[in-house]
Each structure stands twice: as C-alpha cells, then as structure tokens.
Amino acid sequence: MAHTDSFILTTLNNGIQKVVLNKPAKKNAISIPMYKELTILLNESANNNKVLIFALTANGDFFSSGNDMSSMMNVTPTIEDAISTVKNFVDAVIMYPKLLIAVVNGPAIGIASTILGLFDLVYASDKAYFHTPFSSLGLVAEGCSTYTFPKLFGHSKAGDMLYLGYKMNAKEAKKYGLVSKIYNHDSLEGVWDDLNKISNLSSESILATKRLMSKWNREILLKVNAEELNELTKRFESPDLIERVVNFLSRKSKF
Ligand code: COA
C-alpha cells in the first residue's frame, strides 16, 4: 500500500496501518489536500481485510498544529469546499469500523486535539499537550468536541478548553481518560511493540465490540459534525474571525 503524498506516509504490517503526518517543519499542520488524503486512507483501510488497526502518528516534535493556517485565508476553490473536505474527514473517522489509535508524539493543537475524542485508544508522549485555541482566533470547536469533550472532561473543564483555550498536559489528559497510556518520550517507539501484541487477540471479537461501542453514538456524532461545521462556515462570514486570523498571521509574519 503506497501513497505518494510525502506529507503523509503509510505502511501496513501485521494488521497495523501506520499513518504518519510528515510535515515536521510546519509542525504537521494539516492542509486541505492532506485532509483529502487522510479521508481516502481511512475509507480504503475500512475496506481492507488485512487491516485491524489504523494508527495515526507524526514525525518531528509535534503531533500536529491543527489546520494549516497559511491556507486559511486563501482557500481555493471556496471556503464551503474546504469545510466540506474537513467534514468528510471527520465523517470517515466517525464511520471507521476498525480500531482507530493515535500515537501522540507531541503537542496536539486544534482539530488534532478535538478529533482524539473520536479515537478508540490514545497513547501519548509525556511531552504531548492538548490545546484548542478556537476563541482567540474567532473559530468554533470542531471534531465533535462539543459532544465528546463534555463527556470526557465534564462540562466545566470542557468549557475551560473549548471556550478559554486551556492547555491540558498528557498527565491530566490521562486522568480524564482522553489518553489511555503515557510513554516516556524517549521510549515512545515501544508503543509499536505493544500494538503488535494486539495481533494475538481475536480480531473478530475486537471488531464486534467496536461495532457495538460505536453504534450508539454514530448518528449523533454525524449530526454534531455537520452542525459544528455549519457554524464554522458562518464564522467565516464574520469580520471578527477575519480580523483575528489576519492579526494572528501578521503577528507571526513567518506564516
Ligand atoms: N499552519 C501553518 N503553519 C504552521 C502552523 C499552522 N497551524 N503551525 C506552525 N506552522 C509553521 C510556522 O509558520 C513555522 O513556519 P516557518 O518555519 O516557515 O516560519 C513553522 O511551522 C514552525 O512554527 P513556529 O511557530 O516557528 O514554532 P514554535 O515551536 O514557536 O510554535 C506552534 C509552534 C504550533 C505552537 C505555533 O506555530 C502555533 O501556535 N501555530 C498555530 C497553531 C494554531 O493555532 N492552529 C490552529 C488551531 S484552530
């Protein structure tokens, strides 16, 4: 299984499809073509009998800095197309029928954090943190976090994150159950040995349990995703968002 987009690498061994965000110089910011590629990979993987696990990780010191901001104000063909690309990606995550595992090698910002609430298992480096700075940019929470975060963190801590941009470290994320296991950063590679052990378990049993665990929330999550991204489309009509994003981009002139 070879994919040519060098910003996303993928290999398949022992039932584990390892998918690596590979844009470390830009902290693995996710552009529209990368969302499209990830969606194709998820959908192909869903139908590939050889795959039991889709494991998302990244190269470099960040898991991902979220949406690629450099393209945010210059989206072609339209913002609606871009948002529908993100919607298709989140839908593919919601619908994925095998185990969806994140190996969070470093900080996860924006959608790279919110999407984790939809994963089956999240393993994190002790250097990871989870940050959703939507309100400082005039954006709105996505990745179904308006549904999953209150369930995970409780109403008030979810508010701290989604309204106020509270930055949560890996230890706290484990305490709340977003993260299932923390690895010392230098030993993070050991996670792949641990994942390989899953092949000793019954894949039929795992897939049946996944079907049951995802069944009860799936319709709700698809609605949440659609509603969140409708709201995001509206935000893009607001001068408040334009001003905040332009200020942010010009403050960081290197964007
Ligand atoms: N989109 C596009 N480019 C990004 C990016 C993003 N989300 N995040 C980082 N980059 C780029 C920077 O522009 C920089 O590029 P350059 O080397 O060509 O100048 C490079 O990645 C390294 O980033 P830098 O800011 O120098 O690294 P840092 O360690 O000081 O800070 C971050 C890293 C991720 C904390 C900081 O870049 C940041 O806050 N990014 C924006 C995150 C964000 O708000 N995402 C959207 C959430 S809704």
Image: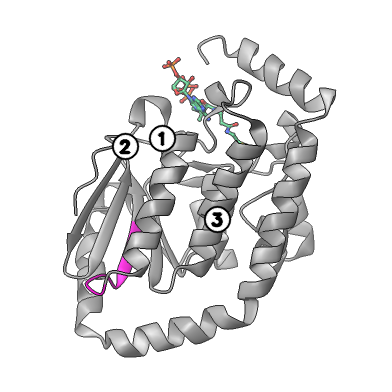
Disc on the earlier residue, 2 or 3: 2
Quarter holding the N terminus? bottom left
> Magenta residues?
49-55
**Is residue 51 shown left or right of residue 215?**
left
Residue 225's x, y, as percent? 66, 57
**Marks 1 and 2: CB-CB under 8 Å?**
yes
Q: With respect to residue 178, does 60 lie above or below?
A: above
**Foreground of the two, 6 or 193:** 6
> Which element type, helix, strand or loop, lies under badge 1?
loop
Among the two numbered marks 1 and 2 on one chain, the one whose residue lies closer to the N terminus:
2
Residue located at (54% from left, 36% from top):
67
Picture layout, residue 121 above or below residue 42: below
Find residue 28 and name its label: 1
- Please name the amino acid that badge 2 sits on: Asn
Q: Amino acid at mark 3?
A: Val
Q: Is residue 152 at all visible to an observer of this figure?
A: no
Image coordinates for residue 148, horizontal then vertical, percent: 65, 64
Q: How is the image coloured?
A: one colour
Read off the residue under disc 2.
Answer: 22
Residue at the front extreme, as displayed:
77
Placement of 249 over or under 2, stated as above or below: above
Marks 1/2: CA–CA distance: 6 Å
Q: Which residue is mark 3?
A: 90
**N-term-proximal mark, 3 vs 1:** 1
Secondary structure state at the residue bearing disc 3 = helix
Is 53 in front, or is 165?
53
Q: Residues within 10 Å of mark 3 (few under 14, many from 20)?
A: many
Give the residue type that dot 1 points to. Asn
Q: CA distance from mark 3 to mark 1?
A: 18 Å
Q: Is residue 51 magenta?
A: yes
